[in-house]
Amino acid sequence: MTQHQKTRTASGAGLGFRRELIEMLKAGVPSEINFFELAPENWAGMGGKSAKDLRYFSERYPFVCHGLSLSLGGIAPLDESLLRRLREFMAVHGMTLYTEHLSWCADDSHLYDLLPIPLTENAVKWTVDRIKHAQDILGMRIGIENASYYVAPPGAEMSEAEFISAIVLEADCLLHLDVNNIYVNSRNFNFDPLAFMAALPLERTCYVHVAGHYVEPDGLLIDTHGAAVVAPVWTLLETAYQRIGNVPTCLERDFNIPDLAALTAEVGLIAQLQSRIGQAERGVVR
Amino acid sequence: MSKTDFQDFQRAFGRHLRDPRQNPRPDGVPARRMAVYNELLFNNICGFLDSCFPVCRATLGEKRWRQLNRSFYRDWPSHTPWFHEIPYELVRYLNETTLKQPLPAWLAELADYEWVELAVDIIDCPIPNHASKGDLLVEQPVLNPTLMNLSYQWPVHKIGPDYRPRKPQPTHLLVYRDDQDKVQFIASNPVTAHLLELLKNSSLTGRTACLQIARELQHPAPEALVSHGLAILEQLRQQGVILGTHLIAAGTTQAR
């Protein structure tokens, strides 16, 4: 068994860890970047160069584990073997936080992307049971992320904010707040992003995502993580910080990856917003 | 709403995503929005397959490759949550099912060979203790744990858009990760393949393994085969296919 590392807890501003960035990061990690995030589905259970690269950085920086395949709202039985391997993988790399999307990606087998859960009482119960089970196996509370979606499943019995709140409270889990997803959904489904965010259980926020998206010719927004973060999303992040304080926040960039300097500038903006809220908080204390 | 109504929606959604031609989109789902998911999910799968199977893709041509990607997504239930194992699911699909799509006889082997490169690159296996300069004849050789000792009916390493073989040609290849973590490919032969198989699955020394092969071949001069075998073993050690020899004897000495 690979040796476990001392735990490192993420704080401040971070960046999604991708193979394309490794050589640039080896030349020196900019001081703006305090932690990294990875998808365990892309890294766990691997040896060779991949494992050595990851080990090099996880010995030096905190990593957050952000899952894609657990299918919290899915039909197939919860993947306990995935969870046990995650627990080991997180221990090996000293990770203390695991988050997943509040979505599903498998009916009886995997579809390999994130899909919207119908907003029903039964879906709340179903998903809560699975989150509790996951938390039991991992031995920790997990964060669930408000996902982006393009279809609102018919037959909704409650609002999305009510759905998320009910699950977070009943499963006693944490909230992973994705402000870009709120913005994308608010544009695609014509709602007020601020009102939506205010209705979430923000006091449970453990982690924040910020990212860019793509606008289709007909105006539909696609959550690609393939462009720079837009101004309204930065504003949403700033507003979120006023409610939740300084919570570790990651810039996601998965496509059209620019050079490290451009990414670092965006990570630096996160840090700037965080430092402002830090000052405001200190002001309140005085 | 009954207990599993939300799952009825999920099943209908999943069926449509896998096979939009045969399964209507679920009631109440706008066509424009469904199209986003159809494109996102299928492109996602194609991305995983394209990056592992560039030769299959180039050799089949874009249209037939995408047909295969679609029937894989439609017909093969993948249960792995690990993205790097999705290509292996395609290899299994090619080997374990009867496909309607007419495909070259060598495609399953070519796909296996392309998958091996990824598998060897990322396989997680500790390097066993070994004496790197140990005597390969009188001691037990230690193989590189990443080694894939491959035997195919087709010359998979030569197939490409410019070479589509019509007749099988038995092919032996060694694929392994070297000490710089680079994947290496070596052309092999039936005797070397058999020798490595013997060494992997037994505790034979280099010499006893060679003598066993001599017996099997009813070789008239077993000692000549041993010296030929030693040359092969030494070359394999130089290439990093063999790491050295087992440390058992040395360990005993140290214990004293």
Image: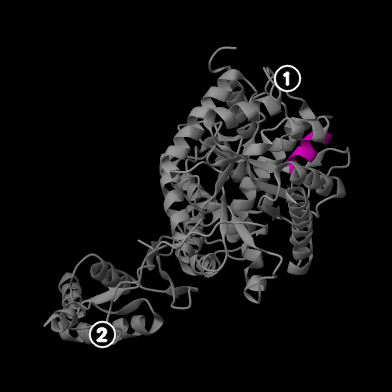
Q: Quadrant of the C terminus of chain B?
A: bottom left
SS at circle 2: helix
Determine crowd level at label 2: few under 14, some 14-19, many 20+ residues with C-alpha closer than 10 A: some
Instruction: Name the mark on residue B230.
Output: 2
Q: Residue furthest top?
A: B1
Q: Horizontal placement of A261 versus A127: left or right?
A: right
User: Which chain does the numbered disc 1 sit on?
Assistant: B
Q: Is residue A185 magenta?
A: yes
**B60, A174: nearer the viewer:** A174
Q: Residue at x 39, y 79 (%)?
A: B240
In percent of width and height, residue A249 lies at 68, 52
Rendering quarter of residue B35: top right
User: Which chain does the numbered disc 2 sit on?
Assistant: B
Marks 2 & 1, CB-CB < 8 Å contact: no
In percent of width and height, residue B24 lies at 67, 23
Residue designated by label 1: B28
Q: Is residue A21 magenta?
A: no
Question: Which range is magenta?
Answer: A179-187
Q: As displayed, is residue A181 above or below residue B116?
A: above
In percent of width and height, residue A226 lies at 76, 53
